[in-house]
Amino acid sequence: MSPEYTTKPTVYDNVQHQFNKAADLMNLDPAVRKILAQTTNEIVVHFPVRMDNGDIEMFTGYRVQHNNALGPFKGGLRFHPAVNIHEVRALATWMTWKSAIVDIPFGGAKGGIQIDPAKYSPRELERITRRFTFALGNNIGPEYDIPAPDVNTNPQIMAWVLDTYLSTMSPQERNRCIHVVTGKPIESGGSLGRNKATGQGIVFLIEQWAKDHSFDLSSATYIVQGFGNVGGWAARLLHRYGARLVAVEDATGAVANQTGIDVAALEEYARAHRGIQGYPDAEPIDHHAFLSTHADIFIPAALENQITAATAPLLTVRLVAEGANGPTNPDGDRILQEKGIDLLPDVLCNAGGVMVSYFEWLQNKRSEFWELEEVDAKLRKRLIAAYDRVQEQAQKFATDWRTAAYIVAFSRLTKVYRDRGIFP
Ligand code: GLU
């Protein structure tokens, strides 16, 4: 049976559970509740691509647009074998909350292709990306729906999306449309600081949490799951405070070293070996041992459903800072709360990425180019303001930070729906 028709719980069930909890607690306006409980558009495209050996393969791509009350649909494109409509729907919905929480004028969307990119050559990936972009056609656009990188996609892939989109326009239109995608290479209109933005945002928020709890980051220990763009940058930037990375896990395995892992050396190793397994300056450990590692901070920066009824009891950390989208399911949330583990929820914690995407979009629209210091300063200021808003709601409603973050988002969206009304 195709995953589209599965009756097993999906990651979208987690979204609905979280949604209902916050909506009940704040007594969300029933009309707004009905609107936000559904996505706006769900686009599924099947398209053929010629492989290097001359054969034709069919691919399935998705773009789900959840809501655009606050601004154009916005969110990444993911290339992964586990991509399906439920996952993309969940990820699109989280993007709406994320943009609303950090107060940027975007709605929520997400897309992806169900593939394992490691199985394709760079030229094949280019053709797959271009053909997918072409299939999406006018469903994306610089003032309508703006893709960005996500799991297994990067600035190079965004450059192909850009070039394909612009190639379908008249030459006169092209240069005013480069903000159709963000996370581009700098030379193609990208922003300084975008590549590290998600990791940087996580670290700014951890720093704020540490300040609030009089916690000394220079003697802290941390573990990271996922060593791609988000996990890698978060690991590297937290290291600069003097904190010690004591265990890392990625798709190939896990390694630990209580005296501290050299982040730069591990990154170099992971690049050369397509993963961290076999890294010589640490012990190989299994998944169970990774999650049980004694540390102060856990940064899940891989996929969904990692902190669950089965795994949350293993954690000994003080703080979970969610770099991934949806790493904790509702059982996991409950157990973290019972254990008194603090949480920086994904929709706040990893919002640095979309925040700097917004800065990139603005720079493109204004033909500006901002210095890195300017990008970082604006990112920090706006994320800390969002942190304060979430903290305030957590106190007001005596609730957990995920629910509080949702309340911030729903309040903003409610105001817009009340002001604007429903047509006709
Ligand atoms: N994929 C990232 C996220 O999940 C970034 C989205 C964007 O920049 O639009 O937040």
Image (spheres, grey):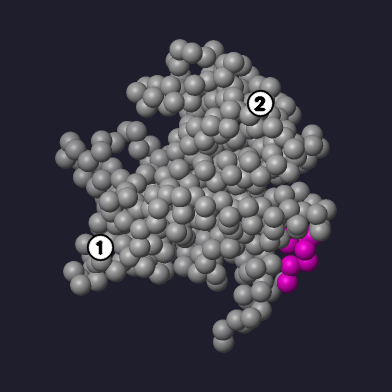
Instruction: State the residue position of label 2.
Output: 219
Residue 166 - label: 1
Q: Percent from the top left, x then y, of residue 15?
A: 63, 52
Magenta residues: mostly which secondary structure?
Answer: helix
**CB contact under 8 Å: marks 1 and 2:** no
Instruction: Please state which of residues 214 and 234 is positioned toward the viewer in this rendering.
Output: 214
Q: Is residue 150 above or below residue 65?
A: above
Query: Going by the image, does 266 lie left or right of 382?
Result: left
Residue 363 - label: none
Residue plotted at (73% across, 44% down)? 212
- Looking at the rendered structure, the kind of residue marked 2 is Ser
Instruction: Classify mark 1: residues with Cα within 10 Å, few (<14), some (14-19) or many (20+).
Output: some
- Looking at the rendered structure, the kind of residue marked 1 is Leu
Label 2: element kind: helix
Q: Quadrant of the C terminus?
A: bottom right
In the image, the segment drawn in magenta is 21-29
* Badge 1 or badge 2: first in the primary sequence: 1
Residue plotted at (53% across, 32% down)? 240
Magenta span has 166?
no
The reply to whether the residue tagged 2 has its Cβ within 8 angstroms of ligand 1 is: no
Instruction: Classify mark 2: residues with Cα within 10 Å, few (<14), some (14-19) or many (20+).
Output: few
Q: Is residue 8 visible?
A: no
Query: Going by the image, does 206 lie left or right of 373?
Result: right
Residue plotted at (36% across, 67% down)? 365
